[in-house]
């Protein structure tokens, strides 16, 4: 389909700009009308270019730097958020530094200053120094109610300062002149540090200037320290921190003074946030880089806490609801919350921690919990919005949120410090640190949850983690109410990405801690029942939001494993897990089939995270790994640690196996026949993978109870991948416990009606009979039994059964000849002649091909049930060879991504040998197609439930003789045009294209799925064209490989798309071997495919509407190709 949106005009290859590397220009979303283009090192990193950039006349996409000033650059850099694109340390940042460094003297001088006045310094440094000086020049103060300045300017100045510093560092690396580098950076820092050092001494300094200086300092520190792993090694962060350290005492004393009663107006709440943010940043850096002043940061923190408490006590004693009093209370509570948030991180380095706890504890005992703030009356219209019911409600929510941060700090740390004064206090009974009693405090938490906004609930959840286990047995109704309300809040945050995951994690830790689970599992009361329901609700939520179940399963698995020199699963934890076995059961079979739009969103999330540091968003925002494979890998890893010789482990394993088999029966009853890669198929495949992992750990007495159920599963209709797993399970059971062989032979004694589609499962076991007989002392009778059993199936009327039986006979007879020829000498002539006759009976055509292919099939040729028994084979190799969608292929490395823990299991992680296999399992799974009279009596291989389209299995080499033969009978000829429509998903468009391709003699039409042929809408538009046109199935994920293969075959890859270099259709001459790629109805051709096209062709349009239907666009180009080929043929004649 032709894409006509403006953004697609530059998606093709663009000329190189002056920026180092291969930065491309393209149009971006018009959030700001004066910025129209993006400067990209790759298609995923936005970088805006102002529209007033005068571009080069001969290269319209190259910037004319002589018309661009540093002011222009800085004015658009501000629109790039650091958490989305221009983050320090990202590839884009580094490319920008190189560009500025290489073109320093090429930019235009701005009207504000002349960069050439100091020829010895770089123009960028001169501009940046001027920017800092202008930024700190402010008018006189307007009064105490002055509004906070916008963060826009501070972010701009900080960005330019960091860019200049990094460019200087590049110069230092090139010239090895550290002194010059530091002197230039000091020029930027001197005005700022000079202002900061006077904050507490210059009482006449305008409020605006103090705000600006602290904003700039905070932005500098945050931009440098956003990557904690690099804090110690980041030279710039160390330099700024050391340089600012001369002013830190003044800064902290200024903040202490301002927070101690000077903030009284609504705008001061924003200043409070600024001061606290600076204090918190100082606290983090002091832990990482050290504090070089006499008075420690913790000393300042303690002073801030005591001052805030005194201020709160004073305000509470007034019983006055005026604005001044209420704002001071909010500020003081925010200070306490900030101190409580930073103190735990400094606990190990702090000797006076008990002072914090005792002072705060004494205040909280006297304070009223959940105390609200009465809405004040304000006459100033500027603050009407903030003091309205809605505006003031946000302030009250903040106040309550900060209260519960303080309570959580006490609950978390009270037991760590022994304070004799508190211990002896008559106000400190056994539950004193829970403020009255745990149940009373839990009720207060519930009250708070009922009035606080959902996105402020996290500290309350953290407190409830301490409270719920203490009252779980005495107040179950209260606990159920707490769980219900907490889950309701977490569910309401589902669409709020920034706060949902932290709240979900806190909720899971609250409800699923070992302490809670063990307490309620013994009583089986209301809390136990509610947790059971909750597991179902979490699983249901995970079907629409990836990563939800992962939070639960990861937490439970980590809490149930005992980490020591060798990781083991604790017995008491396993007893808990047995009561909540649904968690691991759902984890073992987890994996949803998302809708197209959901999958697109999830794929984008995972793709952005996979870019790592190449994408700025991953450097600025903590990655949340939403890979749904992690749910299963966490569960399987835990199961692999179980020891079958341990009584508790043995009981758990047996219980889980029974549940898995029950799940298999339930899925089979839900849908007796199911499509490949459907949800039913995937669930059955996952549960049999889990059973296969656990089978070697089971004792013989338990296997005797489930062996019939496993055989019954083999009798069911299953997809190929599930059958392979069941067959493998049977082989391993018979190998370890040969006593079950007699029950295995009984499986061949069922009625023919029951076995007609499933006997192939049991026949597939016999080619691996050498593995089964390894532990059998008397092998000859068993081999004789196997031969007698399988020979009778060699003459079955079902072709597929005969094929399986024949391969079994051949493998069995090879074993007999190799080891026991004397014992079978009497049968030799009979079996050899029979085998020869059976092979000859296969005839020619597809029947012969199928016989050759089944012998080469991986399950009967290279696969070994014991040597290939590994995580890699079960979860990656086998699914990839069984036509399972790639979503089901789990690389073995994902089982090792469990922190830094090594793989510890008797089950090997990888194969000890390479399993070479060059063909797909479906290479021989097709109908016996010959002349019309040679079709087998059974029309399809019901054993694998695959509807076979005649040309599907010949896709790789376009072996389409049958269709071409039918077309030749009607005198039709086919050209060399291949039309690729794999990106199109509407059956009506595909049906119309099929008809058009057939009419104009295209050689083939490529679609994403041959299931479209059964769609009524497709058939209505195609009017049977699919019967005369070769159709090829190529999934979108395989499209790139297909295009590359066609290129090697001499095809020209042509995209129907508007790009910077697209050809007009009226001017383009189609080669004979042309491949036409059509885009999706909405998105067109993806950018990752456009770069692999040889040429893009667009249809000239005269109207206002700028897009054509994809079928119409395709038809126009198909006709134009046909028209040109007809003219060439006439000219040749």
Image (cartoon, grey):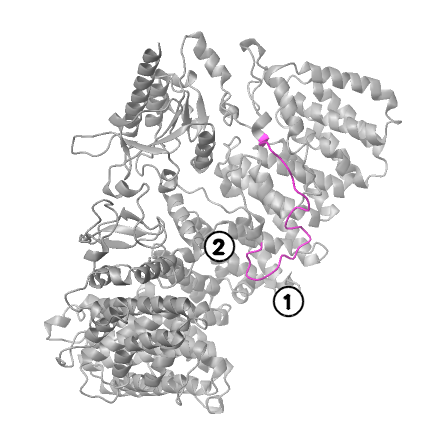
Callout in the foreground (1, 2): 1
Location of residue 1079 in the rendering, given as x and y in whole percent from the top left corner? 34, 34
Q: Which mark is first along the chain, 2 or 1?
A: 2
Q: Look at the numbered disc 1 and give the secondary structure of its residue.
A: loop
Q: Count every numbered label the image shows and give the total.
A: 2
Which one is nearer the viewer's eye here, 446 or 903? 903
- Tell whether label 2 touches label 1 (CB within 8 Å): no
Residue 564 is marked as 1
**Residue at the (34%, 66%) spot, across then down:** 167
Q: Is residue 1049 left or right of residue 987?
A: right
> Which residue matches tag 2?
550
Looking at the rendering, in which quadrant would you find the N terminus? top left
The answer to whether residue 867 shows anywhere in this view is yes
- Using the numbered discs, state the Cα–Cα distance from disc 1 to disc 2 in whole angstroms: 24 Å
**Residue 509: in magenta span:** no
Q: Look at the numbered disc 2 and give the secondary structure of its residue.
A: helix
1022 vs 167: above or below: above
Q: Residue furthest right?
A: 822
Q: Would you call the spot at circle 2 few (<14 residues within 10 Å), some (14-19), or many (20 or more)?
A: many
Q: Quadrant of residue 11?
A: top left
Which one is nearer the viewer's eye here, 641 or 152? 152
Q: Quadrant of residue 263?
A: bottom left
The answer to whether residue 341 shows anywhere in this view is no
Location of residue 714 in the rendering, given as x and y in whole percent from the top left corner? 64, 33
Which one is nearer the viewer's eye here, 611 or 536? 611
**Residue at the (30%, 20%) spot, across then down:** 1119
Location of residue 259 in the rendering, given as x and y in whole percent from the top left corner? 27, 83
Q: Which residues are magenta?
A: 896-921
**Residue at the (38%, 20%) spot, across then down:** 1002
């Amino acid at each position: 389909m032709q894409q006509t949106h403006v953004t697609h005009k530059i998606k093709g290859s663009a000329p190189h700009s002056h920026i180092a590397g291969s930065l491309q220009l393209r149009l971006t979303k018009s959030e700001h009308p004066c910025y129209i283009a993006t400067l990209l090192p790759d298609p995923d990193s936005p970088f805006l270019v102002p529209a007033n950039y005068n571009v080069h006349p001969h290269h319209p996409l190259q910037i004319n730097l002589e018309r661009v000033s540093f002011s222009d650059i800085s004015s658009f850099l501000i629109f790039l958020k650091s958490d989305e694109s221009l983050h320090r340390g990202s590839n884009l940042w580094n490319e920008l530094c190189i560009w500025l460094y290489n073109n320093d003297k090429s930019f235009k001088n701005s009207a504000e200053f002349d960069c050439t006045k100091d020829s010895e310094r770089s123009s960028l440094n001169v501009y940046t120094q001027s920017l800092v000086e202008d930024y700190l020049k402010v008018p006189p103060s307007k009064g105490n109610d002055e509004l906070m300045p916008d963060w826009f300017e501070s972010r701009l100045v900080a960005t330019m300062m960091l860019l200049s510093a990094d460019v200087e560092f590049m110069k230092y690396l090139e010239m090895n002149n550290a002194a010059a580098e530091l002197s230039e950076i000091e020029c930027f820092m001197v005005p700022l540090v000079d202002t900061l050092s006077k904050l507490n001494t210059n009482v006449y300094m305008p409020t605006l200037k103090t705000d600006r200086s602290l904003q700039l300092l905070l932005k500098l520190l945050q931009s440098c320290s956003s990557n904690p792993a690099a804090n110690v090694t980041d030279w710039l962060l160390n330099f700024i921190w050391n340089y600012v350290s001369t002013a830190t005492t003044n800064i902290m004393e200024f903040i202490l003074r301002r927070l101690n009663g000077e903030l009284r107006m609504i705008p001061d709440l924003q200043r409070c946030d600024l001061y606290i943010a600076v204090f918190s940043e100082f606290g983090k850096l002091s832990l990482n880089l050290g504090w070089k002043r006499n008075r420690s940061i913790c000393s300042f923190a303690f002073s801030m806490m005591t001052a805030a408490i005194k201020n709160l006590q004073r305000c509470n004693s007034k019983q006055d609801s005026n604005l001044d009093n209420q704002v001071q209370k909010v500020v003081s509570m925010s200070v306490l919350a900030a101190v409580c948030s930073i103190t735990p991180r400094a606990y190990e380095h702090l000797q006076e921690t008990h002072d914090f706890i005792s002072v705060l504890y004494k205040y909280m005992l006297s304070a009223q919990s959940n105390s609200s703030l009465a809405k004040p009356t304000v006459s100033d219209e500027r603050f009407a919005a903030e003091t309205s019911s809605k505006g003031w409600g946000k302030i009250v929510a903040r106040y309550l949120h900060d209260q519960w941060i303080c309570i959580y700090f006490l609950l978390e740390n009270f037991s760590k410090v022994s304070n004799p004064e508190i211990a002896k206090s008559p106000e400190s009974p056994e539950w004193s640190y829970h403020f009255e009693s745990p149940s009373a405090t839990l009720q207060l938490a519930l009250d708070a949850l009922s009035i606080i906004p959902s996105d402020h609930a996290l500290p309350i959840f953290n407190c409830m983690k301490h409270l719920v286990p203490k009252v779980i047995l005495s107040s179950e109704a209260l606990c159920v109410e707490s769980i219900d309300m907490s889950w309701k809040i977490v569910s309401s945050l589902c669409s709020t990405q920034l706060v949902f995951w932290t709240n979900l994690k806190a909720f899971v830790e609250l409800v699923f801690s070992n302490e809670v689970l063990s307490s309620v599992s013994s009583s089986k009361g209301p809390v136990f029942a509610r947790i059971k329901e909750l597991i179902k609700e979490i699983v249901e939520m995970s079907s629409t939001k990836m990563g939800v179940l992962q939070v639960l399963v990861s937490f439970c698995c980590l809490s149930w494993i005992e980490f020591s020199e060798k990781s083991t699963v604790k017995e008491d934890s396993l007893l808990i897990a047995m009561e909540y076995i649904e968690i691991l059961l759902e984890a073992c079979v987890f994996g949803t089939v998302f809708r197209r739009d959901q999958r697109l969103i999830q794929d984008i999330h995972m793709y952005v995270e996979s870019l790592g540091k190449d994408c700025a968003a991953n450097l600025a925002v903590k990655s949340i790994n939403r890979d749904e494979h992690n749910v299963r890998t966490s569960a399987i890893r835990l199961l692999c640690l179980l020891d079958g010789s341990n009584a508790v482990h043995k009981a758990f394993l047996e219980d889980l196996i029974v549940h898995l088999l029950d799940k298999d029966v339930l899925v089979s009853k839900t849908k007796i026949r199911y499509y490949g890669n459907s949800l039913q198929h995937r669930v059955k495949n996952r549960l049999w993978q889990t059973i296969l992992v656990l089978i070697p750990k089971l004792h013989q007495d338990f296997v005797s109870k489930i062996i019939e159920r496993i055989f019954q599963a083999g009798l069911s209709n299953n997809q190929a991948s599930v059958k392979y797993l069941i067959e493998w399970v049977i082989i391993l059971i018979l190998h370890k416990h040969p006593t079950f062989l007699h029950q295995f032979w009984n499986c061949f004694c069922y009625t023919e009606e029951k076995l007609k589609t499933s006997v192939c499962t049991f026949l597939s076991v016999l080619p691996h009979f050498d593995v089964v007989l390894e532990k059998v002392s008397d092998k000859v009778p068993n081999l004789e039994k196997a031969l007698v059993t399988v020979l009778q199936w060699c003459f079955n009327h079902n072709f597929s059964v005969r094929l399986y039986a024949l391969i079994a006979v051949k493998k069995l007879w090879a074993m007999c000849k190799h080891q026991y020829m004397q014992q079978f000498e009497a049968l030799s002539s009979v079996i050899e002649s029979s085998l020869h006759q059976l092979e000859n009976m296969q005839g020619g055509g597809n029947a012969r091909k199928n016989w050759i292919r089944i012998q080469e099939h991986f399950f009967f040729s290279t696969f070994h049930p014991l040597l290939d028994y590994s995580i890699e084979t079960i979860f990656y190799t086998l699914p990839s060879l069984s036509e399972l969608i790639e979503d089901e292929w789990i690389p073995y490395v994902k089982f090792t991504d469990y922190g830094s823990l090594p793989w510890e299991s008797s089950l090997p992680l990888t194969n000890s040998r390479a399993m070479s296999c060059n063909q797909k399992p479906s290479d021989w799974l097709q109908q016996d197609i010959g002349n019309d009279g040679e079709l087998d009596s059974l029309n399809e291989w019901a054993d694998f439930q695959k509807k076979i389209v005649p040309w599907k299995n010949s896709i790789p080499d376009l072996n389409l003789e049958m269709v071409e033969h039918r077309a030749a009978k009607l005198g039709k000829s086919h050209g060399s045009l291949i039309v690729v429509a794999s990106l199109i998903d509407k059956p009506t468009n595909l049906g119309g294209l099929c008809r058009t391709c057939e009419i104009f003699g295209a050689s083939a039409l490529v679609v994403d799925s041959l299931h479209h042929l059964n769609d009524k809408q497709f058939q209505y538009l195609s009017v049977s064209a699919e019967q005369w046109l070769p159709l090829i199935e190529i999934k979108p994920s395989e499209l790139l490989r297909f295009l590359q293969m066609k290129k090697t075959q001499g095809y020209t890859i042509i995209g129907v798309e508007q790009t910077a270099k697209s050809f007009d259709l009226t001017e383009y001459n189609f080669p004979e071997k042309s491949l036409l790629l059509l885009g999706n109805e909405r998105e067109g051709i993806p950018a990752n495919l456009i770069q692999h096209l040889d040429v893009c062709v667009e249809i000239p349009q005269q109207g206002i509407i700028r897009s054509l239907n994809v079928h119409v666009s395709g038809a126009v180009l198909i006709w134009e190709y046909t028209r040109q080929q007809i003219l060439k043929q006439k000219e040749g004649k």
